[in-house]
Image (tube, rainbow, N blue to C red):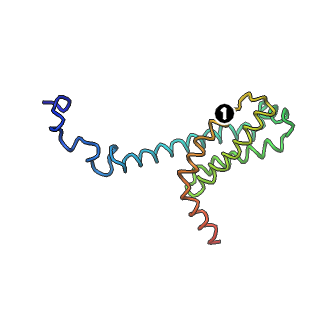
Amino acid sequence: MSETTAPVGARSTASTPSMTSAGTAGSPAGRARGALVALRVVQVLLALFYGIASALPKLMAHPTAVESFDRIGWGSGAMYAIGALELAGAIALLVPVLQAVAATALGALMVGAFLVQLTAFDGENAATPLILITPLALIAWARRTHNADLVRLLRRR
């Protein structure tokens, strides 16, 4: 008789997710490990987005970036500064001791981007910063224990 047709009481304990060993996917430890891997993947994807799609056009003075900053009246200085902040945040998202701080800082930058989109661009792309805030907030919260490590490193100096 196969497992799918066996009576409920006849199931073997080995197939029950709660009875599996500590490192398998059905166990709490396995789910936690999967969540950490998924979070790391999100961090890498966000780092790639901020580094390549967002910071690079600003730092290379791509015409669309220049036009956007001219439109809001901030000029090239602000464009390069924001591009540098985004690139620094992208790199810091990949450094374990800096990831919570980086996610928080990039989240704050996205709050500013949201406000600029609402005021200067009539809400044209206002959803994009809001969408990016969500995974950044998740990273900042999930990696918050690294803040104590960062403080310890800074106090050593």
Q: Which residue sits at x=67%, y=37%?
A: 129
Q: Which residue sits at x=67%, y=50%?
A: 105
Is 98 placed left or right of 122 in the picture? left
Q: Which residue sits at x=59%, y=53%?
A: 100
Q: Position of residue 153 (x, y in %)?
A: 60, 67
Q: Which image quadrant: the C terminus?
A: bottom right
Identify the secondary structure beneath mark 1: helix
Q: Position of residue 55 (x, y in %)?
A: 70, 41
Q: Position of residue 116 (x, y in %)?
A: 77, 37
**Total numbered circles:** 1
Disc 1 crowd, CA 10 A, few/some/many (<14, 14-19, 20+): few
Q: Which residue sits at x=20%, y=30%?
A: 4
Is 63 placed left or right of 20 in the picture? right
Q: Position of residue 61 (x, y in %)?
A: 78, 37
Q: Which image quadrant: the N terminus?
A: top left
Mark 1 = which residue? 128
Is 90 placed left or right of 121 in the picture? left
Q: Tell me the amino acid under the disc marked 1.
A: Thr
Q: Residue 124 is drawn in which quadrant? A: top right
Q: Quick one: which residue is furthest to the bottom in this view?
A: 156
Above or below for 28 versus 116 = below
